[in-house]
Amino acid sequence: MSPGDSETNHGAEGRFDAEARDHGAQLWASQHHRLLAAGGAALLGAAPGAARARRPR
Protein backbone atom coordinates (compact mmCIF):
# COMPACT_ATOMS: atom_id res chain seq x y z
CA MET A 1 0.00 0.00 0.00
CA SER A 2 1.31 3.47 -0.81
CA PRO A 3 0.09 7.06 -0.43
CA GLY A 4 -2.15 8.14 -3.28
CA ASP A 5 -1.17 11.81 -3.35
CA SER A 6 2.64 11.63 -3.53
CA GLU A 7 5.68 9.50 -2.88
CA THR A 8 5.91 10.84 0.69
CA ASN A 9 3.36 9.97 3.34
CA HIS A 10 2.83 13.06 5.49
CA GLY A 11 0.56 11.21 7.92
CA ALA A 12 -3.00 11.89 8.93
CA GLU A 13 -4.03 15.44 9.64
CA GLY A 14 -7.18 16.85 11.13
CA ARG A 15 -8.75 18.55 14.08
CA PHE A 16 -6.95 16.33 16.62
CA ASP A 17 -3.41 17.21 15.51
CA ALA A 18 -2.84 19.42 18.56
CA GLU A 19 -3.72 16.49 20.87
CA ALA A 20 -1.49 13.92 19.17
CA ARG A 21 1.45 12.59 21.19
CA ASP A 22 4.34 10.26 20.47
CA HIS A 23 4.06 8.52 23.85
CA GLY A 24 1.54 7.60 26.49
CA ALA A 25 0.88 5.36 29.46
CA GLN A 26 -1.13 2.84 27.46
CA LEU A 27 1.62 2.49 24.85
CA TRP A 28 4.26 2.09 27.55
CA ALA A 29 2.18 -0.53 29.36
CA SER A 30 1.58 -2.51 26.17
CA GLN A 31 5.32 -2.56 25.48
CA HIS A 32 6.30 -3.49 29.05
CA HIS A 33 3.64 -6.02 30.07
CA ARG A 34 6.21 -8.48 31.46
CA LEU A 35 7.64 -5.81 33.75
CA LEU A 36 4.15 -4.88 34.95
CA ALA A 37 3.28 -8.53 35.55
CA ALA A 38 6.48 -9.04 37.56
CA GLY A 39 5.74 -5.95 39.64
CA GLY A 40 2.19 -7.12 40.30
CA ALA A 41 3.41 -10.55 41.33
CA ALA A 42 5.95 -8.99 43.68
CA LEU A 43 3.25 -6.86 45.32
CA LEU A 44 0.96 -9.85 45.73
CA GLY A 45 3.81 -11.87 47.20
CA ALA A 46 4.69 -9.14 49.69
CA ALA A 47 1.09 -8.48 50.80
CA PRO A 48 0.77 -11.36 53.32
CA GLY A 49 4.04 -10.44 55.01
CA ALA A 50 3.02 -6.81 55.26
CA ALA A 51 -0.36 -7.78 56.71
CA ARG A 52 1.32 -9.97 59.32
CA ALA A 53 3.72 -7.18 60.27
CA ARG A 54 0.85 -4.77 60.92
CA ARG A 55 -1.00 -7.12 63.32
CA PRO A 56 -0.75 -6.23 67.01
CA ARG A 57 1.11 -8.83 69.04
Image (cartoon, helix red, strand yellow):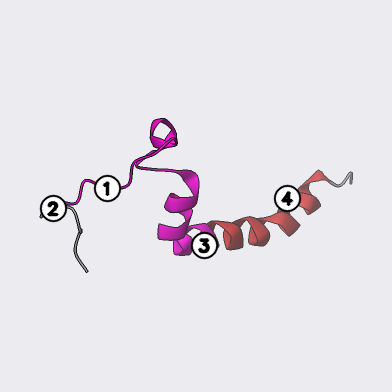
Looking at numbered disc 2 in the image, what kind of residue is underneath it?
Ser
Q: Secondary structure at mark 1?
A: loop
Residue occupied by mark 2: 6
Looking at the rendered image, the disc whose residue lies closer to the viewer, 4 or 2, is: 2
Up the image or down, 21 lies above or below 43; here it is above
N-terminal of the two: label 4 or label 2?
A: 2
Determine which of the numbered discs, if any, sits on residue 38 in the image: 3
Q: Residue 30, relative to residue 22: is it above or below?
A: below
Q: Residues within 10 Å of mark 3 (few under 14, many from 20)?
A: few
The amino acid beneath tag 4 is Ala
- Residue mark closest to the camera, 3 vs 4: 3
Is residue 22 positioned above or below 33 on the image?
above
Q: Earlier in the sequence, mark 1 or mark 3?
A: 1
Q: Which residue is mark 4?
A: 50
- Cα–Cα span, label 1 and label 4: 51 Å
Q: What range of the chain is rendered magenta? A: 9-36
| Residue at 20% over, 58% down | 3
